[in-house]
Amino acid sequence: MSAAATTAERIETYEDFVKVHGLLLTASGLPQSLHRKLFAKLSSETFDGGSFFQIVPCDDGPQRSLVLTSESMPKHSDVFLVDHAWTFRLSDAYNQLREVPGLAERMASIMCVDGDSNSDSEENGVNGNDARKTVFEVVESEIVVAKEKGEDNLKWLELEELEIDDDALLSLDLANKFPGLLALSLCGNKLENADVVVQEVTKFKDLRALWLNNNPVVEKCGVQLADKVLQGLPNLEIYNSKFTSNYGEWALGFCGEVYDKENPGSGKLQDDPSLQRITSLDLSNRCIHNLIDKAFSLLRLPSLSYLNIRGNPLEQNSIGDLFQILGGFPGLHSLEVDIPGPLGESAVEILESLPNLSVLNGVVASKILEHGKHVIDSKLQPRLPEWTADESLADRVLNAMWPYLMTYRLADEEKIDETSVWYVMDELGSALRHSDEPNFRVAPFLFMPEGKLASAVSFSILWPIQNVQKGDECTRDFLFGIGEDKQRSARLTAWFHTPENYFIQRYEKHWNNLQSRKLTLPPIQPYPPRSPLRNDGCPLRLYTDIPHVEEFLTRPEFVITTDPNRADIIWTSVQVDEDMKKATGITDNQFVNQFPFEACIVMKHHLAETIQKAHGSPEWLQPTYNLETNLSEFIGDYYVRKRDGRDHLWILKPWNMARTIDTTVTDNLTAIIRLMETGPKICQKYIEHPALFNGKKFDLRYIVLVRSMKPLELFLSDVFWARLANNSYSLEKHSFFEYETHFTVMNYRGRFNHKNTPEFVKEFELEHQVKWLDIRERVRTMIRSVFEAAAIAHPEMHSPTSRAMYGVDVMLDSSFNPKLLEVTYCPDCARACKYDTEAIVGGVVKGRDFFNDIFGCLFLNETTHVSPL
């Protein structure tokens, strides 16, 4: 959000308003016809939304919606101010929630996490004997009802949430009372012993459906219990709400609402004519792996017109097979399916393959074909907040806030703010839910009543973009302006439960591809090295804009010049591209301290791509995803880790920012996706268990010198240093907001604590009983591999007139194995120049000689205080 240059005079007229806010008005997208009305409401601070809208609770979970209460509201007819209830920077969020009176309470109310989530599950004071008596009463009552209906054998029994434990189940002796049972539900009880449960339920040989959901035994023995149950009940078609591999007519009849407690069917179901009446069949989330079944056919289901197969993997069927099966139902006009999913990634292709469909995922087929929209998912279920009763309001809000947040970044004509501002709209604005076809639009707006940025007050503005009638829900597009070219469907995962199986498949394909990669450095004919030395024997003229080089490069072989045209060597902190060459007169014959295409290692997303292209997934590189291109693969990785009970803590880093600017640690999937909005980032698996130094996190900065990429000539400076966090390391969630706990660069923020390298090494060896020389060799091998990857994947990096110094940042895990963090161009070496140190292998290195040694290696072929890699 940028602001135009302004005077300090208070805005009094509409003309002044437009003059000051012209850029902001254009950026907001507000129609010009509403500009004057916006000015009037801003000037008078008119918040009149309450006269036109009503916030109502939703029936499907803890969320709210916004409904129009006025008779009608034509498109572009009005504009409304929405206040910002909370504006903050991420690093301040937790402290503000704890310290600002009433803030946590208001945010918890807006985000619907202010209630007691455990209220429904509290003990009701019923003791075991009373509960058991109630169970027997229920059973006897069922027997009486069956006899009154003239039924000798009960076929459907529901014993839910009756506190039945293992002893009670045994004493009930259900198999003797109801030998012909077809459906049994024991949901929500206290069954714990798998052997007891298997023994009792497998006595029902005709059982078609069994529900044991929400019993401790399912959580403790899920897979083993399922195997034993299915082995003992060969006719079972539904187990814990999922279809078994034996599913057939009964399961389909149940989902088609033919079979229920009043009409459970019979044990002999072949060719039951009841199925022929089914017109609507909801098979969503039934864990169906194979749709090819004799019961699922036109012969059994001739009237089928609506089918929902969302949430099923269907991985045992090819796309072609599925199209053939579904195409066999000529009356099938409406289909619900995950897109992307088992039928592919394109709604258009699905409709072309199933021409009889008139509605796909609730959207008219002609409309999909008209717009060529490939991903249609109008029925996604919202991600609702989860919390426990003992969580503080601040903790609940931190977890639940991400779907509600919006963001902007302040800027003027001189610079852009390095950190983004996040905000939560007031109750009215936060009640707007998402729609792919919204009837309202929202945009942030910065009002400067005094005509300057210092007086700015932030609002959101809301206006109708469709004709809206009384009682209509008011919606906005959470991803306005973001299409499939920017991964819209995957990004909707921040707010909705998108098909997990699709993302897992994308991840597995990505992972298998990485595992198959392994390139080697081909034999290289060495290029004859070009010497930078002058033929006339004069010192090499050096142009530099780096003060430490100018101050500490004191060797007589080099002389500083202020004219880049006359320099033999250009040593600069800025990129030397074609524009700079034209502007300064730099030529290709001058030596430069950077290699062509070095972005492949110094930009974080390119670094990961380079390594993955050459080495696949080496252990020294944490799993890394470019969120701009591989969001789906990342989401799949996240789901797999969560499913398997592995840690899923990640760190987000901007592509090309230093000093941990806009860097975040989180395990919240919605947060990770929303953080994409503050700029392109990589998402990298966080090193949860790093090696610590006196209980604190640290990383290591190494200095690598590159004389040549072809052949690869690398040198490692004897000077390296440890960078220490100030706080003790913690994985407690609150600590993720503490810079001085999880980050180590204190040169620019925090308290800087220098630790002399020899002292650090000696104390580290003593603390962990390790030999640093062993660690050093592993680090050297890793660094060599990094630059080999660049040489393999990007041979175009070679240049005979390039010599460069890079900073390589390394962290050790708890097993003292190195992990690559990043590679930095023209690293800050102030510490190397300031402090004398003692090399791990070698003698004392004087800080004042650091650049003398660096330039001696790169340009004079010396090896003082460096070692070849």
Image (spheres, rainbow, N blue to C red):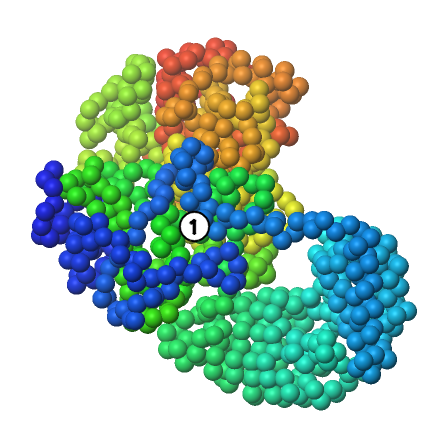
List x then y, in percent, for residue 437. Answer: 37, 68
Mark 1, residues whose alpha carbon is within 10 Å: few (<14), some, or many (≥20)?
A: many
Please name the residue shown 30% across and 31% down the image: 573
Left or right, residue 290 beside residue 91: right
Viewer-proximal residue, 378 or 844? 378
Image point (74%, 86%), residue name: 272
The amino acid sitting under disc 1 is Ile
Which residue sits furthest right? 176
Q: Give percent across and percent down for residue 479.
A: 38, 58
The image shows a total of numbered marks equal to 1
In the depicted view, which residue is nearer to us: 103 or 134? 134
Looking at the image, residue 308 lies above or below residue 719:
below
* Residue 72 is at least partly visible in this image: yes
> Which residue position holds label 1?
110
Q: Which quadrant of the figure has residue 862?
A: top left
Q: Is residue 727 above or below residue 187?
A: above
Q: Residue at x 14, y 42 (%)?
A: 451
Q: Is residue 623 left or right of residue 606?
A: right
Task: Identify the residue shown where x is 83% and y is 79%.
Answer: 147
